[in-house]
Amino acid sequence: MFGRKKTADRAGDTPQLREHALNGPAPSGADAQGPIVVMMDLPAGGGMASVVSFVDGTTSLYTSVGGGVIGIGEHPQANQESREFLALAVSLSEHFRPGGADGALGQDDMRFVLRIGDALSSATATTVDVTNEGHPLAPLHSKGQRVLTLIRLISEEQERVRGSN
């Protein structure tokens, strides 16, 4: 699906990566009580893809069928977009409810998960609804899609560079 900088090659890795993002220690230098991570879950290929952006700009893509992309946040543009994605999620947190970070999504659903300190909150919407400009989470969806696009573009470029060496 995507080129891979560093990959989670086994299907069993994704739940652990996801668990670590949602419940592991805060990134070095982050305020342990402040915003830590935002995750956008969407259906993909019969499973789920999770776009993950940490407070330090770390940027990853996890897929439930195994694989993914880790380490894209080293790229300055992805790092900045990830930080903005998290900040936007915090600004829209009134639309989130406590918990709800786990469980299957409907084929047409997507979920945003926000971690502030140790507390998780989530917001779920249909893909059709969230792409409507009037939906309160539409800006968050757009920003998450921007991060996802950067993950794809940067990882493809890195694959091209590796392939030419």
Image (cartoon, grey):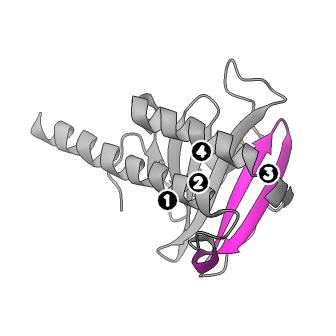
Q: Which residue is mark 2?
A: 14
Tag 1, which secondary structure? loop
Q: Are marks 1 and 2 in contact (CB under 8 Å)?
A: yes
Q: Position of residue 49 (x, y in %)?
A: 54, 62
* Foreground pick, 19 / 120: 120
Name the kind of residue labelled 3 in the image: Ser
Q: Is residue 103 left or right of residue 44?
A: right
Q: Which residue is mark 3?
A: 93
**Residue occupying image coordinates x 69% and y 17%:** 29
* Magenta part of the chain: 110-129
**Residue occupying image coordinates x 20% and y 37%:** 162
Q: CA distance from mark 1 to mark 3?
A: 30 Å
Which mark, residue 66?
A: 1
Q: CA distance from mark 3 to mark 2?
A: 25 Å
* Foreground pick, 43 / 162: 43
Q: Is residue 114 left or right of residue 6?
A: right
Furthest-left residue in this view: 164
Q: Are marks 3 and 2 in contact (CB under 8 Å)?
A: no
- Check if residue 77 falls in the magenta segment: no
Q: Position of residue 44 (x, y in %)?
A: 50, 71
Q: Quadrant of the C terminus?
A: top left
Name the kind of residue labelled 2 in the image: Thr
